[in-house]
Image (cartoon, rainbow, N blue to C red):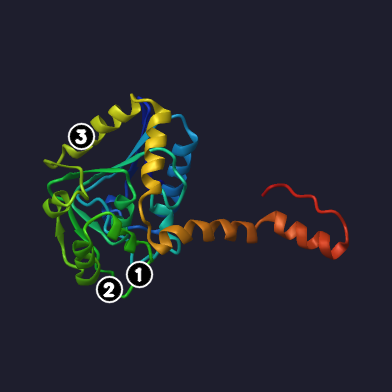
Amino acid sequence: MSLVKVESSEGITTITMTRAEKRNALSQALCDQLYDAYRAFEAGSDHVAILQAEGPAFCVGADLKEPPAAMWKAVPHVSHHLTKPVIAATQGWVIGGAICMVMTCDLMVSADTTKFMYPEAKVGVFGGLMPGIVSRMPHKLAMELLLLGEEISVKRAYDVGFVNRVVRLGEERKEARRMAKVIADSAPLVIRTLRDFANQTLPRGPAEIFVPERYKLEQIANSEDRKEGAAAFREKREPKFKGR
């Protein structure tokens, strides 16, 4: 079943979570489909992407009834090394792992109904990516979000620069599209280089750095080439690697 809708026009890829009946809670299937969407965007010719969601909530974080084993796949710029900008367009609740998703986006437009909460300490779960929030908003507010698990209003998030624009509900996609069009019409090489240089100065949390690298190592460990190399060693012959 498709949980993500991907559309492309005018140099802009739009990635929409469609699990509205579950408030876009992150199951492994949804995480996997988001990962595939990011990968297709990076490989394609579009210059910028918009990440948005159907329903009254952007995303309420991990689906506790179907906990994803690899939720990091849903997080832009962590699940896949993207060289192009991503803009988040949010409404309603942005909870738990969903904050990780929007904090790694390059820009964010939020409806005035947007609310942020990170209740992991109250629930007893922790995926490891959230400490990176400390480099995206002032330290004390970040610690309030992490340690207290209480609601942070979109106004507070905007006032400290975590959100770029706050608009009336229903206008967030239009404003995100306007911003995306500005980027899509700009010089692609300059946009990518500006983004790359800027992000090189941005401190990241330990898991934000390690998770994608661990995935690469797991791919090698589970690859046909690893099995072929071991077999060739045992059989005292030259290995025939296939690059997969």
Q: Mark 3–mark 1 contact, CB under 8 Å? A: no
In the drawing, does residue 183 fall left or right of residue 148?
A: right
Indicate the quadrant where residue 128 lies: bottom left
Q: Say which residue appears at 35% left-offset and 69% top-offset.
A: 126
Q: Say which residue appears at 33% left-offset and 52% top-offset.
A: 101
| N-terminal label among 2 and 3 | 2
Say which element carries label 1. Answer: loop
Q: Is residue 196 visible?
A: yes
Q: Which residue is mark 1?
A: 126
Q: Mark 1–mark 2 contact, CB under 8 Å? A: yes
In the drawing, does residue 80 fall left or right of residue 103?
A: right
Residues at marks 2 and 3, CA–CA distance in whole angstroms? 34 Å
Point out which mark residue 121 bears.
Answer: 2
| N-terminal label among 3 and 1 | 1
How many tags in the picture?
3
Q: Where 1 falls versus 9 (above or below)?
A: below
Residue 185 screen position, x and y as percent: 33, 24
Residue 155 screen position, x and y as percent: 11, 51
Q: Amino acid at mark 3?
A: Glu
As rendered, which of 240 and 30 lies closer to the eye?
Answer: 240
| N-terminal label among 1 and 2 | 2
Say which element carries label 3. Answer: helix
Is disc 1 surrounded by few (<14), some (14 to 19) or many (20+) residues within 10 Å?
Answer: few
Say which element carries label 2. Answer: helix
Q: Where 71 falls versus 165 (above or below)?
A: below
Residue 24 screen position, x and y as percent: 30, 53
Q: Which residue is mark 3?
A: 175
Q: Amino acid at mark 2?
A: Ala
Q: Where 104 falls versus 42 (above or below)?
A: below
